[in-house]
Image: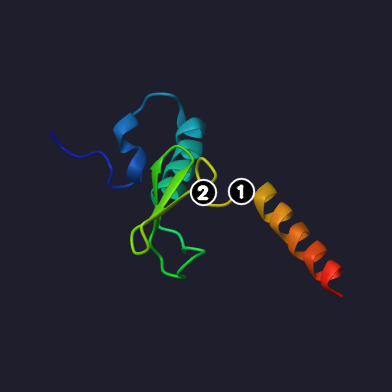
Amino acid sequence: MAKCTKKVGIIGKYRTHYGASLRKMVKKMEISQHAKYTCSFCGRTQMQSRALGIWHCGSRMKTVAGGAWTYTTTSAVTVTSAIRRLKELKGQ
């Protein structure tokens, strides 16, 4: 049986099911989910997804909660920057 992933990549497992638009969206999500991210604790590119929303750093053995498909979400970035800014204002 031949592999059907030469052109389509990770979504070859779906073959011709579900339509092209949905497969393209799923491809984007699955690539981001299986990618390795930079750990915010040690700075290495070791952060990998263990389960939906659970991320694990292989070098520091640290497990944190994050986004479902990516390590950080846009709302989390907004909140952390607001907290940092408020801490700076409080320190002055």
Mark 2 = which residue? Answer: 70
Where residue 57 appears, as percent x and y from the top left, is 39, 57
Q: Which residue is drawn at 28% across and 47% down?
A: 6
Q: Which residue lies furthest to the top in this view?
A: 17
Kindly check if marks 2 and 1 are in contact, taking CB atoms under 8 A apart as contact.
yes
Relative to 52, residue 92 above or below: below
Where residue 72 appears, as percent x and y from the top left, is 57, 52
Q: In which quarter of the image is the N terminus?
A: top left
Q: Which residue is drawn at 50% across and 31% down?
A: 22
Q: Which of 37 and 79 is in front in this view?
A: 79
Q: Residues within 10 Å of mark 2 (few under 14, many from 20)?
A: many
- Label 1: element kind: loop
Specify the amino acid type for callout 2: Thr
Q: Residue furthest front?
A: 91
Picture quarter containing residue 14? top left
Task: Specify whether 60 is left or right of 91.
Answer: left
Q: In which quarter of the image is the C terminus?
A: bottom right
Q: Between marks 2 and 1, how big is the CA–CA gap?
A: 7 Å
Task: Specify whether 21 is left or right of 51.
Answer: right
Q: Nearer the viewer, residue 69 or 2?
A: 69
Q: Residue 28 carries which label?
A: none
Where residue 78 appears, as percent x and y from the top left, is 73, 54
Q: Residue at x 49, y 40 (%)?
A: 53
Q: Residues within 10 Å of mark 1 (few under 14, many from 20)?
A: few
Task: Specify whether 83 is left or right of 66.
Answer: right
Specify the amino acid type for callout 1: Thr
Q: Which of 1 and 61 is in front in this view?
A: 61
Q: Which mark is residue 73?
A: 1
